[in-house]
Amino acid sequence: MKKKREFDFLKERKLQISLLKMKVTVLLLLVCVLQSVAGAYSQTTKYDISMTSGKLENVFKLIEQKGEYTFLYSIEDIDQISSVNVNVKQADLKEVLDICLANTKLTYEISGHLVIIRAKDEKPEDKMVVIKGVVKDKKGEPLPGVTIVEKGTKVGVATGVDGKFTFTVAKHDGIILVFSFVGMKTREITWTGQKELNVVMEEESQDMDEVVVTGYMNVNRRDMVGSYTTLKADDVMMPAYSSIDQMLQGQVPGMIVMNTST
């Protein structure tokens, strides 16, 4: 009798375990079915949207009217997009978003029934800009060795033998390049996105102070003390004379030229 009771208990215990396993299996199957149905519904939801020069926010509102998705975004981000043009029929959510956000700095992320609109992560190379160009003189000849510096920094490069240069600088508004070269006027040029800069530099004319030749040194005229005589080339160039001393003879008061022979 005792053995029979133990047998019935074990039999009942096994039955309970089997029923528990069946419940867990059914529950897992139900979850999978619900997820499949939700995914299928999400994939089959289509949108008919026709908008020309409209606001991006209005597109989001049209999608939200379907009741499936809610959008999360920053007003500052979407205000950067002045207008969107979209004309689709029976398009899914991703197709609509790809059209609206094409060629913009925004991207999207779908998490369940929430659509997150955010700015794209900038790549390191997106923070730099490469400026190319060539520097020539007024005659069109390339100028090698021209120094090019970004204004306000110490970052710079120099032109090659062909006058060309490649300059990588941090990307920002109002990039000003300063071009300098010995004997040339310094130039400042604002880069506005040109594929190649063509820079022409002009010679810098400097007025030289008049000097006085004393015979043993050159003295600035304004620093000269005492009397002096100014001679021009036309005053001394005489075909009859073959030497400088003969040409100066009698042209300068008080000047005596003595010819000696050895």
Image (cartoon, rainbow, N blue to C red):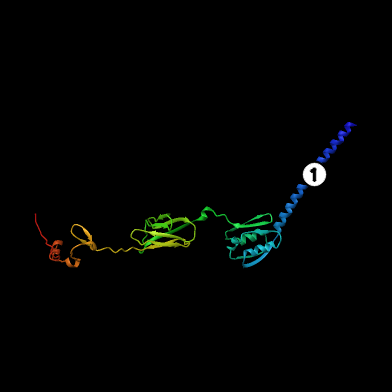
The residue lying at 41 percent from left, 62 percent from top is: 188
Relative to 182, 170 lies left or right:
right
Relative to 140, 225 lies left or right:
left
Task: Please state which of residues 128 and 207 is positioned toward the viewer in this rendering.
Answer: 207
Q: Quadrant of the N terminus?
A: top right
Q: Secondary structure at mark 1?
A: helix
Examine the image and state in which quarter residue 245 appears.
bottom left
Task: Please state which of residues 52 and 210 is positioned toward the viewer in this rendering.
Answer: 210
- Image coordinates of residue 146 in percent, x first then y, are 38, 57
Residue labelled with disc 1 = 22
- Image coordinates of residue 189 in percent, x first then y, are 42, 62
Relative to 206, 68 lies left or right:
right
Q: As shown in the figure, which amino acid type bears the numbered disc 1?
A: Met
Task: Please state which of residues 242 and 59 is positioned toward the viewer in this rendering.
Answer: 59
Please, which residue is most extreme toward the top here? Answer: 2
**Above-or-below relation of 10 to 213:** above
